[in-house]
Image: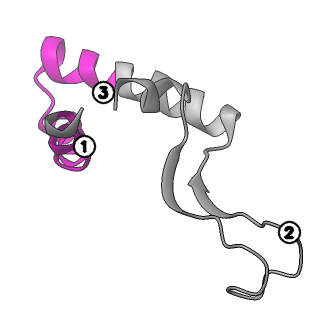
Amino acid sequence: PWSWLVLGRPVSFYYESPTFGQSGCRAGQCASEVLAIGTPLLWWAGLIGLVYCLYRWVLRRDWRAGAILCGLGAGLLPWFDYQ
């Protein structure tokens, strides 16, 4: 999960490697994959926004920034248990 924040490694949701005749494969071997790859410009802008939210929450005690960080943490922090 550490590398997800900087697009170091995409998240693989699904991967299958069927052989000829399975799942519509018409070649010797096929691959089917679903990846979560973000758009780099939007992703890096989001990281800048995350740092700004941390600044607002820690130094300015802005509850709205804390709510955004809480939502992000709820989605990301559970994955650190499966490293």
- Mark 2 residue element: loop
Please provide the residue range marked out in magenta.
52-80
Residue 49 as seen in the image, left or right of residue 37: left
Residue name at image x 72 percent, y 63 percent: 31
- Mark 1 residue element: helix
Q: Position of residue 9 (x, y in %)?
A: 54, 31
User: What residue did someone put label 2 on?
Assistant: 28
- Mark 3 residue element: helix
Give 82 or 23, whichever is nearer the viewer.
23
Tell me the number on the disc at residue 54: none
- Amino acid bearing label 2: Gly
Give 34 or 63, whichever is nearer the viewer.
34
User: What residue did someone put label 3 on?
Assistant: 53
Give 38 or 55, whichever is nearer the viewer.
38
Q: Position of residue 1 (x, y in %)?
A: 34, 32
- Packing grade of label 3 (10 A; few <14, some 14-19, many >=20) is many
Q: Does the magenta stretch include residue 72?
A: yes
The reply to whether callout 3 and callout 1 are in contact (CB within 8 Å) is yes
**Residue found at the very far top of the displayed protein:** 59
- Amino acid bearing label 1: Ile
| Quadrant of the image occupied by residue 10 | top right
Q: In this view, does 52 lie above or below 74?
A: above
Tell me the number on the disc at residue 68: 1
